[in-house]
Image: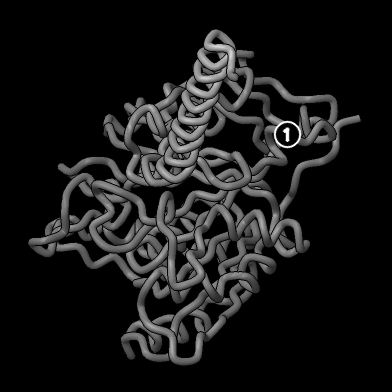
Amino acid sequence: MTNPSTGAYQSRGRNRARRARRWLVAVASVATLGLIAWPVMSYFEIPPFTDKGDPVSYGRTGGGGGTDASGKTLMPTGPQADFKNAKTLADGTHVSVVTLDGKKSGFKGKVWVWAPKEYTDDPKFASSGFPVMIALPGGPGNDSNYWSLGEFGPDKLSLEKSVSKWYQEGKSKPFLLAMPILNPGPDDKGIYWDASDIPGQAKMGTWLTEDVPDLMKANFRTIKSRDGWSYMGSSTGGFASLKSVLKHPDKFKTAIANGPDIVPDSPLWRGHEKEKAENNPEVLAKQLAAAKGPDVYIAFQYGTKENAKMISDVKKFMATYGKGPVHTKLWEIPGGTHNGATYLKNMEDPMKWISDQMEGPVPSS
């Protein structure tokens, strides 16, 4: 005969065990749902599952500049910019964004920046200067810069991931990337600014060649000489890259110009022919040749299915001006069309060619 008190005790024990199992199932279910939900919530940038908008710092600034013992590194001058995280990459690096109030141009706009993990995480480069590439979009380029957050093609290529990969393979310098907007307004009415200081307009030439580099110098360890400064761009951004290096060869040494215009052609130049000529790559290349330098290196890239006139203009520029201090090299992309995905997928060789002309970070002693 069963003892009533013993049976009651066993019944209570079974109830507790069932409750414990239910709690374990519930906790496990919540944990599983959390694991499933986290990447989904993160992808759609739903707080608190995202770090988008968090402050980003790339190290100490405000040291007043100066150089390291080698004399090659320009230390950050400050003040520190208010960078906010726009995207975190798989390797833990951040693409961040700041609204820059250009002191020299008077123009205010967004700039996205990225530093490779070697800049922040590699002890041997802790005091080393890194080269800078200013990457410019095509199209309107007034509200975004597709190099900053874009993923291209089925392989989801990005400029940041590509630079990291190419550096690991010995095919690129570990560039700091500055990715500013290109125009102060949309080009939906055929209006664009040719990355220039057109009289009466926003000074986009000064913005791109003065204010954006100053932002990088203020916040990052950079290379003091022009050997650490480059441009890359597509279409209108390709024109801007070509023109900026030819106009300021004392500040910038190399450029990759993808599917570029060769001459300025904005309708805003009307009535300003003198200033237009001062921003014409053909005129600038001729002047640089007459001055016998300094040497600059321009890598051209275009797809064989692009606009025939652009292709002809590039070839004509290279044949006429690609001599003396103006070094040029061409990569044709078989079947390629006029878009960033085409250019990025085939940019490895142009990137190596310009990188071979540039300074990289020197390990700290």
Residue 121 position in % (x across, y down): 73, 34
In this view, the residue in front, 254 or 351, is: 351
* SS class, disc 1: helix
Residue most extreme to the front:
1
The residue positioned 64% from the left and 43% from the top of the image is 116
Residue 5 falls in which quadrant of the image?
Answer: top right
Q: Is residue 274 above or below residue 299?
A: above
Q: Is residue 305 above or below residue 175?
A: below
Q: Is residue 267 left or right of residue 348?
A: left
In this view, the residue in front, 159 or 51, is: 51
Crowding at mark 1 (Cα within 10 Å: few <14, some 14-19, many 20+):
few
Residue 221 position in % (x across, y down): 66, 31
Query: Which residue type does callout 1 highlight?
Result: Asp
Asked if one can make out residue 185 in the rendered structure from this viewpoint, the answer is: yes
Question: Quick one: quadrant of the N terminus?
Answer: top right
Return the residue at label 1: 121
Q: Is residue 227 left or right of residue 99?
A: right
